[in-house]
Every structure is written in C-alpha cells, then in structure tokens.
Image (spheres, coloured by chain):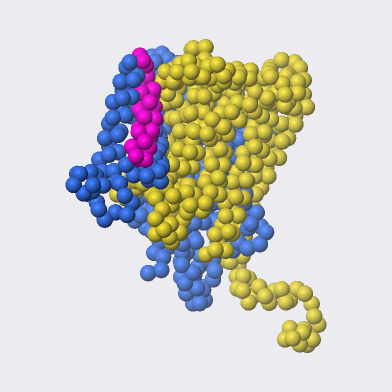
Amino acid sequence: MSTTPSVAAKRPSTLRGGHLPKWAPWAIAAGSVALGLGISAAAGLHSSIQWALIAAILYVLGTYVIAARVENRRQAKDRVVTSLVWVAFLLAVVPLASLVWSTVKRGVKVFDLYFLTHSMGVVADSETGGGIYHAILGTLEQVGLATLIAAPVGVLTAIYLVEYGRGNLARAVTFFVDVMTGIPSIVAGLFILSLMLMFELEPFGFAGSLALAILMMPVVVRSTEEMLKLVPNELREASLALGVPKWRTILKVVLPTSLGGITTGIMLSIARIAGETAPVLLLVFGSKFINANPFEGAQASLPLYIYQQYGSGEVTAYDRAWAASLTLIAFVMILNLVARGIARWKAPKTGR
Amino acid sequence: MDTTQIADAPPPTQPPTAEQKRAARGATRPGDRIFLGLSRGSGILLLVIMAAIAGFLTYRAVLAISKDDGNFLTTFEWNTGVNPPVFGIAVLAYGTIVSSIIAMVIAVPVSVAIALFLTHYAPRRLRGPIAYVIDLLAAVPSIVYGLWGALVLVPHMNGLFGWLNDYLGWTGVFSWQGGAARSMLTVGILLAIMILPIITNVSREVFRQVPQMHEEAALALGATRWEVIRMAVIPFGRSGVISASMLGLGRALGETMAVATVLSPDFLIHTSLLDPGGGTFAQNIASKFSEATEFGRDALIASGLVLFVITLLVNGAARAIIARRKEYSGANA
C-alpha cells in the first residue's frame, strides 16, 4: 500500500482514509460537460438548456460514484451536496446574467442623447426615432411627489415606534407596517382607483404618486426603524440628563446620528417604487406627449412606457422598450449604489 | 403606603395625579406634545390607510358582485361589457395559484442552496460581491423582467417544452401543441427568477445567525460540511426559510407586469402547463383595465380584493412565523 503511489498514500496522516485530489471536481465537471455535449450531439438535441441539464446530472452522479469508491458514503454525500449547491448557484446566475446582458446589448441600439431628450410626440410605434423625455419627466415628478408624502410619514412613524411606541397602538402599527410591505402594487393602484371612481376623476400624475406613496411608506418605516434602533441609548440619556426636552433630543441627537442610514433607506425605497408599473398603468394612464403638470391630465412614466412600447408589437418599439429598460435599470442601480455608499460613509457609530 | 398618605391630605381626585405623573415625565412641554402628536398621527395614518384600502375595495367590489349574473367564485368567464354582466374568478384563482406553486417549487430549493452557498460554500472573498449583486438584482424592476421574459425567455423555452412533451407529454400536464411558450410554466419560471433574490436574502440572514458554537461542535465531532448543515444550520433556520418563502410567495401572487407581458391569456382552465392560456388576478386587471367601463373597473376591483385578502393572509402568516421565532431565539440567548 505504501509503495503504490495512490492518492491516499500522499496523506498518511488523515483519519478519513481515501481522499480525492483537489482537481477531481474540475476533472469530473469537464468530463460531464464533454459527455453531455456528446450525448446531445448524438441524439440531435439542439437546445443549450438540454445539454447543460444532461451535463449537470452527469456531474452529480459522477461525483457521487467516484467519491463513494475512493472516500466513503458520507464524504460522497457531502460532495454531491456541494456540487448541487454550486449547480443551483450557476443555474440562478444564468438567467440573471442573460437579463442584464440582453438589456444592455439591445438597449444601446437606440440609446443616445436624442433618445433622452425627445418625447414620442408625433412618432408612430412603427417608426424609428422618438424618445423617453416625457416618460423620465413623468417618473421623476410622480416619484418625487410620492417621496414628499411617504418620507415624512414613514420617518415620523418610525420615530413613534422606536421613541414612544409602547402598548397596543404601537403593536398594531408594527404589525400593519409588516402587512403593508406585502401589498401587491396593483392593489394599491386599485385603492386609489376606487377613490377616483368615487369622485369621477380622470387619470393624472398625482394619483399615481399617492399609490406609490402607499407602497413606499412601509419600506421607509422599516428601514428608519432599524437605523433608529442602532442609535446608542447613552446618547439619548446624556441629552435628556442635560434637561433637553425629548423632542429636541430626537431632532438634534437621534436623527442626526442616524441620518445616513435613514437617507439610504429612503433612496432604496425610491429605487423600488420607480420601477412600479401597475399602479401607474391604472392611475396615470400614459401619454405620448410631454405633460409637466402632475395634477392634471395623463402623464407618461418610464416603466409604463416600456410596457406600452412592448405592447405595440413593433420591432422599432421593442428597441425603444429595451433602451428605456436600460435607462430605468441604470437609474435604479445608481440610486442603489449611491444609497449604499452613503450608508457606508455615514454608518452610525455604535459603542466604540 | 406613601400614596395613601398624600391622598389623605388633599381631597383625592383622579385628574391632578394623572397630570402630576405626566409632569414628572416631562411630557407637558408643548414641543413634546406636538411632536408626539405628529409621530403618533403618522402611525395612525398608516392604520387608517390600511383600513381605507380594505373598506373602499370592499365597497366597490360589493357594487360589482351584486350585479354579477354568474357566480363570482365559479364562473369561467369575464364579460363585464354586456347586460347582465357575467364574470367569475375561478380561472384567475387557478392561474394565480398554479403559477405561484411552480415559482415556489423552483425558487425555494434554489434560493436556499444559494443562501447556503453564500454562507458556507463560496470562497470567502467572493461572498460579499455575490451578495451585493443579488441585492442589486432584487432592485431590477418587474417590468424589465417582463420584457426580458417575453422577448428572450419565451423563445428559449421551445427546446425545453419539446423535450418535456416528448418524455412527459403522456401525463397531460406537460403536453404541448407547439406555438409560442407563453404559458403558465414559463410564467412560473419567470416568477421563480424574480423571487429568487428576496428568498435568498432573507434565508442568508437566517443562516448567518446560526450560532457558531453549534457548527463548531458538529465539526469537532467529525461531521462533514453537509452534516453540519443538516444538523445545525437547517434546524436553526427552518422557520426563517419558511417565512422567507412566504414573503416570496406574496411577491409571486401579486406580480402583475411580468405575467401580463409573458402570458397569452384566455378564460379556460388548461390541464397542460405548457399550452398558452389561463390568467392571474393581477394580470387580468392590467390587461382588461384599458377597455373596461366603470362597471368593468368595479369588477376588476372585486378580483383585486380577493388578491388583497390572499396576500394579507400569506404575509400575515409569514410575519407570525418570524415573530414566533424571535421569541424562541430570544429565550435561548
């Protein structure tokens, strides 16, 4: 045994007996990919999904059999789970990478300064040209108004829950904030719609803002609450001990300490509602023209623009839809990155 | 004892003592009172909004359902433009549940695996960036998923559908007549991709909180990595994973745009998941809305109310599980 240059002999100190070399998983992976390609070529399958699936199954089976022979059953199981976890990860990466890739690739086709600065005014869906200026304007106004409503209400609610909240009311608010987080966006839209039906109103931008504000509030409350909880109690006690009233303590000590985190939370929630389509579809209706007044007349919005361009079924419109998607993703991603940057930069100093 | 002595001297009345108490806490300052009022008012406003949503939706729904000539729960039709109107949610309920189940069946195991990957398997240097990317993917708007699903995913499904039809077509569930893959299965797969990030994120948080001691104890006894996960990580994280899945389910149930762009709807229940047709609550509202009359909108609101109640129940259950777990782990800490 000691004379044979077996893999196990290289590690005489291990208590677990046989051991696969480090390159084994890679070798098995390469083998199964080759075999998967071979099988699908032989069977005349053309979909890339199929050979990938065959290769994945072969890999898992191969790992188990080989590991069970060289090592033992427990190690084999461990290796199978490891490979399953890796396969799951890769499986999830493929569609997500494809999403980003196709958006960028197809989006840059018509994405330029002209696209950003012109509306769809007199452009038919089947024609080239046109842009998203009106949609960007609508989205910014609707989201801005929603933020003006939701941010103060959300932050104040969080202050109530953290600084004052005890008893049944606070418990009810906490529970319903949680529940509200899960309201489908279309239901929020229907709620405002039922109000509009009651007052016989035509679609306008601010109605969309109201629905977006409903979606935004619970997110702001949750994130602000977390941030306020991070503020050390010693700070509050020091301020109160100096005779500062509680409300000034909150305004001058608690809020400044957690300002970075609160800003981050608000920006993340803006990123979330900026992509909401359903309520805007019901309440703002969409328009091809520039309408800068959110309080009267139908407005456009970026996500709604994507939906309507897609719905027209024209190839030129698809190009515009992709370019608008690229804009929307870029907007959301930049908000996310900036928000996270602020969070890291102004992280509350807890303890020492 | 003290209080009774004090109460003996002046005539004992309730208001002054309450005021004294408040004065002792310093809550009588006008600034404090205004600030408390504002913040409490905001909290109450949230409750009022929730109540208003339920109230107004119910009111409009009752208006619509009272004129419904069919049975609202069992009719296979959505015809609100005729007199008398006939509409029912049977197909929508079926489609919503089926697409969500498909999404859960795919997304939950994969998300849990990714969460485990991030906490236990991935190379340490990659964990941060991967988690970050998943966070960003959770922020991709649903309409973009919808556009991608309709223009990229649907054409790519043909191979898989043909394959399923060849080998599993005899079950009836996976039979396929050809044509574009704008079916429940595609919708389910797309929903699965969309809810992956949220389930992964919550599960990862839970797995992270597994006490290091438990894992080290298992490792010291000679457990393999899988055995550590099975014996220490999964039992600790089970309720967290369940609630994460419920949150994902809530997302899938209410998803509108991704379904509206991908599915080619009709008002029939198809046994095959591969053939186009069917519908979901949210998709039906989005697609039928533009041509709906005022009554038609009321009918759509009625179906939205059903969706609202379902998501409330699902989310409430998820939160209840999380809350119970908090108490449990708090008692242990």
Q: Position of residue B156 (x, y in %)?
A: 41, 20
User: Which of the 4 quarters of the picture holds residue A21?
Assistant: top left
Q: Position of residue B63 (x, y in %)?
A: 75, 29
Q: Nearer the viewer, residue A189 or A77?
A: A77
Residue drawn at x 33%, y 51% is: A16
Q: Nearer the viewer, residue B104 or B88?
A: B104
Q: Which chain is yellow?
A: B
For residue B75, above or below residue B118:
above
Q: Dominant secondary structure of the magenta stretch?
A: helix
Q: Which residues make up the magenta segment?
A: A43-69
Q: Nearer the viewer, residue A255 or A219?
A: A219
Residue drawn at x 40%, y 43% is: A73
In magenta segment, residue A63: yes
Is residue B146 in sight in this rendering? yes
Q: Position of residue B144 (x, y in %)?
A: 43, 30
Q: Position of residue B23 (x, y in %)?
A: 64, 75
Q: Which chain is blue?
A: A
Q: In this rendering, would B200 be left or right of A330?
A: right
Residue drawn at x 39%, y 50% is: B224
Q: In this rendering, would B326 be left or right of B117?
A: right
User: Which of the 4 quarters of the picture holds residue B117?
Assistant: top left
